[in-house]
Image: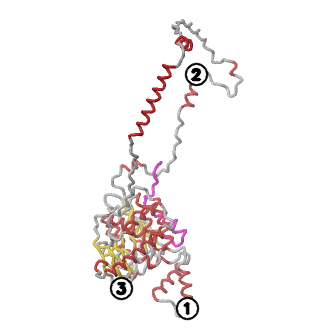
Amino acid sequence: MQRITRVKVDDNNPSKLILLDQYNLILSLLKPYLTERTFSIFAVPKLIDNNQYLAWYTNLEGQPIPVDSIADESLKQKITETLQTRINDVETSIKTIVLDEEQQKIISLWLPRIKSLSNEIFVINDDPVIIYSLDEPVLPKPAITEPVISPKTFWRWWHVLLLSLLLAALGALLFCFYPFKKDKLAETIPQIIIIPPILVNKPEPEPIAESSKEEPKFVENLEPKELPIEDKKQDIKIENAPKPVPKVKNPPNCITKEEIKNNPNPSRMIIVFDNSLSMIATLAEPPSEVEQFFQYLGYGYPSYMSEQEKIKYYKKMTRLPSRLSTSKKVALSSIDKIQPNIDISLVTLNHCPAAHATQFYDYSSRNILKNNINRLNPSAVGGGGTPLYSGLEKASSMLDGVKREDYILIISDGEDNCSKNNICTLANYIATKKPKLKINIVDIAGEHKIDCVANMTGGKVYIAQSSKDMIKQMNKAVSDLKVDRPVCQ
């Protein structure tokens, strides 16, 4: 994979990082549905030099040349047509992909700029590659349809007026010339006699004698028995009163909405996720077999193994459930349990020399965080490695840990193999400078090589060497951080 170009990243503009996450999500959605040639129009972005620059890479081989620098107009036209054809293939493929609501929204935002020919375009051996700027994607403007207003013609209301006048004239003629006598008319008109009202003195109602509460006797045979008059009134009032809302039984440790609202400086959390090559190992084999597998990967397979045996052995040692697949599944489940007022960031350990950190995601943006975790896939690019020292250093620098309680959860299967610095010394420094920063560790390999990080910061180590252990230990690790309080109903 070669680099095409790089641009300076503005650290003070987190929206650009969100757009970068959206673009990476689109690549992961489209790749399974596109041919390799069609997918090659998308350059792959990566943050480099401690996230100061954004570099754009491609799998195409050859010298990248900006299309605008090509003098041959016929060649430039040919490249433009090739790009348009591949963009049409992308648009057609999108219609066949089943997307959820969040993915559909992101696609609708980005599709207009994918189709736009105003992007920066490079060409490598006649194959175009698009470089996007991280500006806000513009929503496509809906077509504005002018309302059709029918013209108000003069004759429309004139016809109505003329018809009214004709009917009035016809009525007058009938009245004047119709042969009938006025006396006859008088006979046909009914006489209205007005009778003055007669005032009648209404007799005073006789007082009703109070009945004894033991009577009337006719009530006794009714089942169920009616209540006395006074009690009956009270009973009617009770029936007409609104039914009380049943009380919800909340767990004792729930967090109220008022508590969330009145906390201007809530805790923050960072998940340090090991995405190194060792995470491809299966959890279905004992640690000794996994260690032997790593020896083969590092120093080569035995000479007596045929190519078919090597392939069969590799598939066996990387079958599901793997360390990575189970870690992803459990991490996604844990994120859903973390209370909504805690923002979360992700630090990934991909390869040496440094770890990669995302921005903090609030509750409404957790789908982007989960998509980032879903896309994790170990790669040998850069030589691999587990930059755990760099990841811990970066994560601790992003948290307060002095004025508020902050948390780090490390999910890893080993120690740092990128730096010669002592990670225990770093943990001691963090504990001194940030006494309210607590670090828990889910140790997949169970080798206890970084226990000091948890011990020095008041955290705990949870060993998980099987799929069931992983779920159990991860839930314990999150619960122990006290960040999974449900919201009171």
User: Marks 2/3: CA distance?
Assistant: 98 Å
Q: SS for tag 1?
A: loop
Residue 29 at x, y = what percent? 46, 70
Q: Which of marks 2 and 1 is nearer the N terminus?
A: 2
Residue at 46% x, 76% y is 447
The residue to which callout 2 is attached is 230
Is 371 on the left-hand or right-hand side of 15?
A: right
Left or right: 390 as drawn, with respect to 199? left
Query: What's the coloring here?
Result: secondary structure
Report if residue 11 is visible in the image.
yes
CB contact under 8 Å: marks 2 and 3: no
Please provide percent x and percent y for residue 190. 55, 13
Residue under label 1: 306
Inspect the image, locate mark 3, and give the three-letter code of the amino acid beneath it: Gly
Give how far across and how far down residue 213 sits, in percent: 63, 18
Q: Give the range drawn in magenta.
A: 463-489
Is 386 above or below relative to 110?
Answer: below
